[in-house]
Image (tube, rainbow, N blue to C red):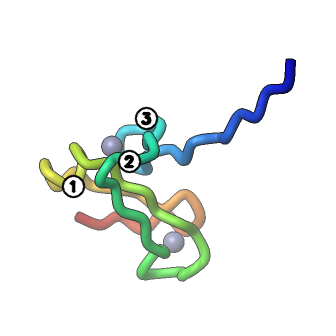
């Protein structure tokens, strides 16, 4: 049995896997431009803060 598990990206705010089809957003950290920030649909909705794992930048 072959398994092709696609590793889901984790939401930077809540650390939950972002499911395909979810209206999540991803963008590069505005500070270091080096780390990809993922935000789930819920975190966008509630404007949760995120923290860049690379440089520690926090944003709304
Ligand atoms: Zn989230
Ligand atoms: Zn950063």
User: Badge 1: few (under 14), some or many (20 or more) residues near its Cα, within 10 Å?
Assistant: some
For image coordinates 44% across by 40% down, the residue present is 19
Q: Of tags 2 and 1, which is closer to the observer?
A: 2
Residue at the top extreme of this rendering: 1
Q: Are marks 2 and 3 in contact (CB under 8 Å)?
A: no
Give the image location of residue 26, x and y in percent: 42, 65
Give the image location of residue 25, x and y in percent: 35, 62
User: Badge 2: few (under 14), some or many (20 or more) residues near its Cα, within 10 Å?
Assistant: few
Establish if 29 lies above or below 18.
below
Give the image location of residue 40, x and y in percent: 33, 48
Label 2 to label 3, Cα distance in Å? 15 Å
Residue 51, quarter of picture: bottom left
Q: Which residue is mark 2?
A: 21
Q: Nearer the viewer, residue 56 or 22?
A: 22
**Picture mark count:** 3
Q: Which residue is mark 1?
A: 44
Judged left or right of residue 9, residue 43 is left
Residue at the left extreme of this rendering: 46
Q: Of tags 2 and 3, which is closer to the observer?
A: 2
For image coordinates 85% across by 25% down, the residue present is 2
The kind of secondary structure element at disc 3 is loop
Give the image location of residue 34, x and y in percent: 60, 76
N-terminal-most mark, 1 or 3:
3
Q: Are marks 2 and 1 in contact (CB under 8 Å)?
A: no
Judged left or right of residue 1, residue 10 is left
Establish if 43 lies above or below 57.
above
Q: Which residue is mark 3?
A: 16
For image coordinates 27% across by 55% down, the residue present is 49
N-terminal-most mark, 2 or 3:
3
The kind of secondary structure element at disc 1 is helix
Answer yes or no: disc 3 within 8 Å of ligand 1. yes
For image coordinates 45% across by 45% down, the residue present is 20
């Amino acid at each position: 049995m072959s398994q092709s598990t696609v590793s889901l990206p984790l939401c930077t705010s809540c650390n939950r896997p972002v499911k395909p089809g979810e209206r999540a957003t991803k963008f590069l950290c505005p500070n270091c431009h080096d780390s990809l920030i993922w935000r789930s649909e819920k975190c966008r909705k509630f404007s949760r803060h995120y923290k860049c794992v690379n440089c520690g930048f926090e944003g709304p």
